[in-house]
Image (cartoon, rainbow, N blue to C red):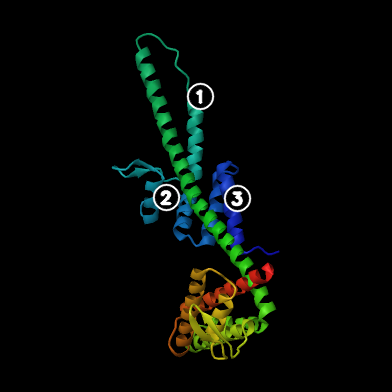
Amino acid sequence: MKQSTSEHILELAKELLDDIELNRISIEPLLLKASRLARLTGSEEIKHWIELELKGHSFKDVVSVKYIDITGRWENKEKGTAYVAPLAQIVTMIDTENAKLKSTTTPDTSGDWAFRVMQMYQNNLAEITTRISQLSGIKSKVLAELHSFITDVYYEKEFDNLSESIFEKYKNEVDNLIASTCGDVLEQIPAVMDRLTEGDNESISQALTTVRRIIDSFADSIFPPSDQIINMNGNDVKLDASKHQNRINAYVYERIESKSRKIKIRQNLSNLYDRVSTGVHNDVSAEEAKSLFLNTYLLLGEVLHIGKSDIEKK
């Protein structure tokens, strides 16, 4: 099965976190892999910074100067000197300095020059240790910055996938309920999506007209019109063919006890119906039209779930 971009990003981020935390691959392949993640996520600044870590930094580059500071590459900030070499070269320098440190032995000397020789030895030792500390600090800060970026991507995609999974599961449930209860409503949904995708004013108006028809068809399916009058909260409410909202509210009223939930559904339905009806004749942005359609879909789902729970109890 072909992997989606979102799934690929999540998998790549997870691999990179393991690469860093378990020290699985060397610096250059790690940076190249992280560069791919930055490219896939559209993180242009991070992508540019990683390129600098691969090729070397420059004082003429604003992003470079920013990350020289973040990663502690300054050797002497006041004099404007810094370790600008690629990170792979920094790692090689660390290895070289460590090799020097291991090969440096305490001099066996005595006599008049003993003090001077020991002083030179200690100064050399201090210089090597300082360089190792500075270079290791650069490596650690670069890896920490990478880790932070990758972690953010990982959790963002993990949340996105979870949200998509939750919504997809709910959507499938609602689709099944609509199909079994009012199939003609389900048939109208693709037309709304097509119109909203077109995005011009006429298409949006037509989409909202269809959304209003969906609500009307939904009311006819779950609570067919009748000459009956029902008392809801002390008010006599007609349920004839023109009273679509009344019939949906009556369906809810007869099936749940929660007063606050009844009020919430009634208000949501009223607001949606009013806005959809108004939007047919007035300019509504594509974003608002999509929001109205999505809210209508979610409302239908909530009402149908109420009916499903009522059936299950019986």
Secondary structure of the residue carrying numbered label 2:
loop
Q: Are marks 2 and 3 in contact (CB under 8 Å)?
A: no
Q: Position of residue 250 (x, y in %)?
A: 56, 80
Q: Position of residue 176 (x, y in %)?
A: 68, 74
Q: Residue furthest left?
A: 78
Identified by mark 2, the residue type is His
Which corner quadrant holds the C terminus?
A: bottom right
Q: Position of residue 282 (x, y in %)?
A: 43, 88
**N-term-proximal mark, 2 vs 3:** 3
Q: CA distance from mark 2 to mark 1?
A: 31 Å
The numbered dot on residue 57 is: 2
**N-term-proximal mark, 2 vs 1:** 2
**Residue sitting at x 48%, y 88%:** 280
The total number of labels drawn is 3
Q: Which residue is mark 3?
A: 15
At label 2, counting other C-alpha atoms closer than 10 Å, the crowd grade (few under 14, some 14-19, many 20 or more) is: many
At label 1, counting other C-alpha atoms closer than 10 Å, the crowd grade (few under 14, some 14-19, many 20 or more) is: few
